Image (cartoon, rainbow, N blue to C red):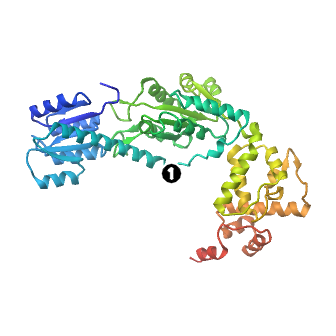
Amino acid sequence: MTQNQASILIIDDEESIVEGFRLFLAREYVVLVAANGEDGLKQVNEKRPVVVLLDVMLPDINGIDVLRKIKNIDENIEVIMFTGVNDMRTAVDALQFGAFDYCLKPFNINELAIVIKKAIESQGMKKEIRYRRLIENEQSAHISSLIGESIKMRQIYEIMDIMSKSDTTVLITGETGTGKGLVARAIHFNGTRSNKPFVVVNCNSIPESLVESELFGYEKDAFPEATTQRIGKFELAHQGTIFLDEISSLNLTVQARILKILQEKEITKIGGTLPVKIDIRVISATTTDLREAVKKGQFREELYYRLNVVPIRMPSLRERKEDIPCLANYFLNLYKQKFNKDIKGISEHAMKILEDYYWSGNVGELQNIIERVVILAKDGESITHQNLPIDLLILKGKIESEGLTLREARHQFEKQFIVHVLERVKWNQIKASKLLDIHRNTLLLKIQQLEINLKQPVDEQLEEEEE
C-alpha cells in the first residue's frame, strides 16, 4: 500500500460480488467493505473514501437513500451505483441525487475499473476547482517586485533558482513590500510542483478563533456551526506548496500542529479521527525576527529550525537604490497603459529625488506614488519634481525646493492634500468638502484651479447624490 492510494468502499450484501471486487481492486486501492447501508454510512462518516460502490438493493436501507445520505455527509465522494434490475426510474433517481455512474449486473470488471478511475479523476478535478475558487480573489503577485539587477537581487535570483529544483522548506524574511510573496510564487511555479496547487495563507489576517479551521479543516458536526465538511488549506495544497505568510502571528498551539504535520506528513481535521496523508512543500515568510521571538518564548524553537532550512532575506528598497530607476519606469509604463495617459517619462531631477527617498514601504510605496503622479500628470509632459508628493521633497529635514517658488510649493501641497482627502472618501466631493471644512462650490473651484483630474465626472456624482 502506497501513501497516496485512494480508498474505495464497497456497500453490498452479496459476498461473492464483494470478494470479487476486493481481489480485483486491492492491487491499486485501499478496499473497505460494508454489508449493509448503516455500516456503510458509518464508514463513510469515519473514513471518507474517495469512491463508493453502492448496491441499490440492501438488506436495511434503500440504496438511493444511502446515496442521498452519503452526499449529505460529503458531496465530493463519488458514488457508483449498481443493480441487477434494469429499472430506468431508479437509474434516473440515482443520477439526479448525485451518483457518478449507474451500472447493471453482471458487468465487465475492466469497464468498471475505467469508471472508477474516471470517478477518482473527477474528485481530483473538484478539489482543484475548490482550490481555484479559493485563490481567485487573492491579490496577484506583481512581477515588478523582483525587477532589478543589483548585486543583492542577483544573489536572491541564484538562491531562488536552486530552491526551485528542490523540496526544501524555505523561510523568507524582510520588510513589508519587499516581494516575499513573489519569491515564494516564483520558487513554486519554476519548480517540479508548478502544475500543482500553490495555496497562500495570510496568517495575520485570519481571526485567531478560525485559524485551526482554516488551516486544518473540520469534519461535519465537529462543532455546532460545522454543517458540512471543510477541507483545510494544508489538505488543499496536497502535492503542491503552501505559503504561510506572516507565520509569526500564529499562536503556540497552532505552531505545534504545524510542527507535527511537518514531522509526520499527515493531517487530522478538527473533529476527525482518521489522519490524511499529505505531500506538501512549505514556504513561509515573516517581517518578524523569529530568533528573537524564540528567545521570548513567542515562537517554537523546533518549528523555527524546521522552517529555516534555507533562509532568504529580501533587501529593502533602500539597500538596492540602483534598482529604483528601472522599477519607477516599469510602473510608469504600467499606469500609462492602464489610464491611457501620454506621459513622456520621468525627469532626471525627479528620478534623483526618488532615489534619495527613504521608502519605508519599499516597492509597494514606490508603486503607489507612481500611480498617483500618473493619474495627476498632464498628457504630453514628463513627470518632474513638481509632480511628486510633498513628503518626497522633504529630505532629512531639508526641503527640496530647487525650481519651486513659495507660491508653487503652496500650490503643490494644496493639490496633493485635496487629492489625498478625495482618495480617502473615494472621490465623493460632498464628503471631501465636509472633511476639508469648505463649501462644495469652493472645492469645485479648487479642483479646477489646481487641475485635479477627477476619477468620476461631476455630473455623474450629482446624479448619484440626487438618487
Q: Quadrant of the N terminus?
A: top left
Task: Give the side of residue 246 with respect to residue 60, left or right.
Answer: right
Asked whether residue 224 is in view, the answer is no
Looking at the image, is 234 positioned above or below residue 87? above
Is the residue 168 above or below the residue 346 in the image? above
Farthest residue toward the left? 85
Task: Name the residue carrying label 1.
Answer: 137
Compare residues 290 and 1 and report the one nearer the observer.
Answer: 1
Q: Residue 186's x, y, as percent?
A: 57, 38
Residue 143 x %, y %: 62, 45
Residue 345: give x, y in percent of width and height: 77, 56
Residue 305 percent across, percent down from the top left: 56, 22
Q: Count the numbered circles shown.
A: 1
| Residue 173 location, quadrant | top right
Q: Is residue 405 left or right of residue 391?
A: right
Is disc 1 surrounded by few (<14), some (14 to 19) or many (20+) residues within 10 Å? few
| Residue 164 can be seen, yes or no | yes
Which of these two is toward me, 390 or 186? 186
Name the residue rendered at 31%, 30% in the picture: 5
Secondary structure at badge 1 equals loop
Task: Name above or below for residue 92 compared with residue 326.
Answer: below
* Foreground residue among 342 and 419: 342
For the residue marked with disc 1, what is the amino acid? Asn
Residue 399 lies left or right of residue 277; in this view the side is: right
Along the line of sight, the residue nearer the viewer: 315 or 119? 119
Check the picture and name the quadrant holding the C terminus. Answer: bottom right
